[in-house]
Image: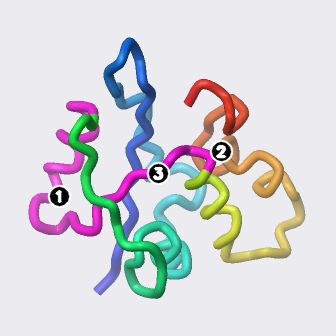
Amino acid sequence: MGCDIHIYLEKLIDGKWVMVDQPDYKRDCRQRNYARFAALSGVRGDGPKANGWPEDASAGAKSYSDRYSTGAHSHSFLPLATAAKIFADTEHDGNMKSNFYREWPAAHYFDIEQEINGPF
């Protein structure tokens, strides 16, 4: 049985979280990379315990997540900079021809053009 990561990018706008993207099918967000699963929320390996679904999550993210019903598990949330670093550190092919994924991981993995310390 496989295990997938489902990502919802949210931005705080006027004190409320708003879903701005769902990059599941971009780049390699959907690869079954178990080192990444473990690093994100302790799934399929040693790593931090998932910190649960955020109480103030956007309605959009909640709606998408609810589509998976009981198949959704190990909910967790992270700042973009942390998630981007985990994705770069758990890249399947550490010998990529381009170092872009290491220098700009938010842009590479999530198509976010802002610097990771920017407004997201």
Q: Is residue 98 above or below residue 32?
A: above
- Residue 105 percent coordinates (x, y): 70, 50
The residue type indicated by label 1 comes to: Tyr
The first of marks 1 and 2 along the sequence is 1
User: Residue most toward the left?
Assistant: 70
The residue type indicated by label 2 comes to: Ala
Q: How is the image coloured?
A: rainbow
Question: Would residue 68 be counted in the magenta stretch?
Answer: yes
Q: Is residue 9 above or below residue 87?
A: above
Q: Which residue is mark 2?
A: 106
The number of discs equals: 3
- Residue 109 percent coordinates (x, y): 62, 51
Of labels 1 and 2, the one closer to you: 2
User: Disc 1 and disc 2: Cα gap in Å?
Assistant: 25 Å
Q: In terms of secondary structure, where does tag 1 sit? A: loop
Whether residue 91 sits left or right of residue 95 in the image: it is: left
- Residue 56 percent coordinates (x, y): 25, 35
Q: Look at 35% across and 25% down and name the residue there.
A: 18
Of labels 3 and 2, the one closer to you: 3
Q: Which residues are magenta?
A: 58-81
- Residue 8 percent coordinates (x, y): 38, 44
Whether residue 26 sits left or right of residue 99 in the image: it is: left
Q: Which residue is mark 1?
A: 68
Badge 2: how crowded within 10 Å, few (<14), some, or many (20+)? Answer: many
User: Disc 3 and disc 2: Cα gap in Å?
Assistant: 13 Å
